[in-house]
Image (cartoon, rainbow, N blue to C red):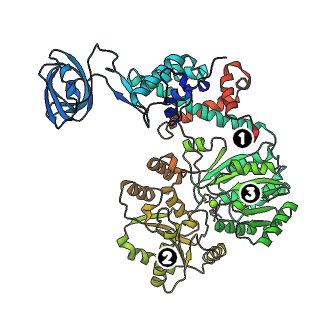
Amino acid sequence: MKLNVYEIPVKQVQGVRGKKPEELLALGITTVGELLDYYPFRYEDYTLRDLTEVKDGDRITVQGTIVGIPQVQMYGRIKSRLTCKIVVDPLFITAVWFNRHFMKDQLVAGTEVVLTGKWDQKRLHLTVSESEFPGKGSSQTGTLQPVYSIAGPITQKWMRKTTRQALEQYGDLLIEVLPQELLDRYELMSRKQAVSLLHMPGSVQEGVRARKRMVYEELFLFQLKMQAYRALNHERADGVAHPLDLPEVRAFVRALPFVLTDSQKNVLAEILHDLQQSFCMSRLLQGDVGAGKTVVAATALFAVVKAGYQGALMVPTEILAEQHKRSLDRLFEPYGIQVGLLTGSVSDKKRRDLLASLQMGLIDIVVGTHALIQEDVYFRSLGLVVTDEQHRFGVNQRSILRRKGMNPDVLTMTATPIPRTLAITAFGDMDVSTLRELPKGRKPIKTYSVTHDMLERVLGFIRREVSEGRQAYIICPLIEESEKLDVQNAIDVHAQLQFAFPDYQVGLLHGRMPAADKDGVMREFSANRLQVLVSTTVIEVGVDVPNATLMIVYDAHRFGLSQLHQLRGRVGRGEHQSYCVLIADPKNEIGKQRMKAMTDTNDGFEIARRDLELRGPGDFFGTKQSGLPDFRLADMVADFETMEQARDDAAELVKRPDFWTGASYSILREFLRREHIFDSELLD
Ligand code: ADP
Ligand code: MG
């Protein structure tokens, strides 16, 4: 067994002495492997240029012959300007050095020099930053030199030298990890060659090919982990194989007040299929706002309850929990299914009763916020957990359940349609179902972007809609990082609108209200006892009031695209024509692009795509709980095609029996072992 570069301390590299190991530690480098993985983020180009082909202001390297006598001007004792005429065929140029008067003696007429610096086309001046005399010692002339992201006392020069030294001493230990068939398929160079060329590319093309190889490797290993996890999960038979009564489920669907869309039927079939298998379902259900995810989840919960198990529906806000509780009650009442509600604001006594009923199995389905999956909540037989709206059922939650001896199927619903590349990255370990169509008969929401000076007309528009019996949401300006100011805004706007609409009931909703009050306001609005609802973004997700047809967003340019689309999704849920009015004075290009995207399209997938373009993947999910890996080289947007290839390749590989046994894959299996893929406790 050859030595592993990740096990060799970096101080074994010649020249890493004294304080250097410590300084490298500050960059996160302790081993030779980590040093070699520390790729440059760009290259300095020292290839020789032809002066007839460069542009004013370029940083260039040229070779020439000294012809004039150097001139020095001193400014005080240290500052100086040294100039000298040089012939760089076919031009006479002036080379200028600042504060390097001591170089004067080296500039002997007839001597060849290689100069790097900034080119001034008009005056034919080159302001020199680096000079070399060919034939004297080692040369960077003609090369691309790596530029590392460094800090502290470490210099670029030292990093270059040390990395080169490490490659020389240990380059042979860089073993291939990719299977030969993949190297062949994509004509990828070996790992050793790629690492070495990334640090020292002979040409731009070589650097590009080296990067291509390492990006593929990075994405492939990531996807292999995801796909192996998925494959093993499907094989492990420690989930619940629900004995579904399909005719009964069909009868439930037939009794719904509407006919399911084809998309809903397909997705439901996928879910029902998974529920009957003995593996743990881990499925992402994505669909645009208003696509009808709730009823799909409700049907799955119905099926599980009829099979003798309990279900849980987890949502991000109490308002949403209340709303789901009401609609599930309505749906399940005829079947005698008991639905409980568990949120942070349920009284202690109620909570105790509820927990007891859950444990005894007297309650079939519980709807709630995070309070649901706490240590003291026990189920008699939890069979399905549904999480609604953009929070993942994560690591900890699953292991909490597992510790309680439960291994339910999990359905995660998201209304933020996720571009495919991101879905296979962030949710690559899950199976994905997508609702591709909206229920029939929906009228597309008309969206307008207006400026603040049109506020009067907007108020007139609200009056017209409300006088026709419809309802309106007014979303208040978002003040970054300050919920308190958001609330103040909402209170101010509420006062103004009460004044503007004395004949109508104008409600107020914000995150700092006690939960019972919030719920009360929502209930009033649902029942049309409030015609206008002024709110902060607490209603962003999930809220469903079909009679509301008008969504007004103040200061819309402050909101993200996905958020605006979510807000817009609160209307257009019933038979009436709905409108979304974005009041905005975008100050920058991104703001303008957002308004344009919103007025251009109603399609959440298109919105998501543009959002991704405008913000980048990290922000797309919100950086904190993004669940996105931090790739060293790969870029999720720019390298999306490679990501898809890597995923397909990884998925295909883990399906092959010889992958799990064959000698040629032992390195990949070792990689998976190190990533704890086989360790079921750490799986989640
Ligand atoms: P979302 O996917 O945004 O969660 P909901 O589940 O809230 O969407 O559904 C939006 C609205 O559409 C609800 O009022 C729901 O009752 C209704 N709905 C769902 N499916 C259908 C359908 N197939 N036909 C008509 N209306 C439907
Ligand atoms: Mg929903």
Q: Residue 177, percent across and down? A: 60, 23
Are the residues at dot 2 and dot 1 in contact (C-beta closer than 8 Å)? no
Label 1: state its secondary structure: loop
Where does label 1 land, which residue?
683
Q: Does label 1 point to a residue whose CB lies under 8 Å from ligand 2?
A: no
Q: Which of marks 2 and 3 is nearer the N terminus?
A: 3
Q: Where is residue 387 in the image (x, y as percent from the top left)?
A: 68, 56
Query: Extreme bottom residue here?
Result: 503
Single out the mark in the foreground, 2 or 1.
1
- Residue for badge 2: 465
The span from disc 3 to disc 1 (Cα, nearest Å) is 18 Å
Q: Are marks 2 and 3 in contact (CB under 8 Å)?
A: no
| First-in-chain label (3 vs 1) | 3
Note whether 236 is above or below 185 in the view shown.
below
Residue named by callout 3: 373
Residue at x 74% of width, y 46% of height? 281
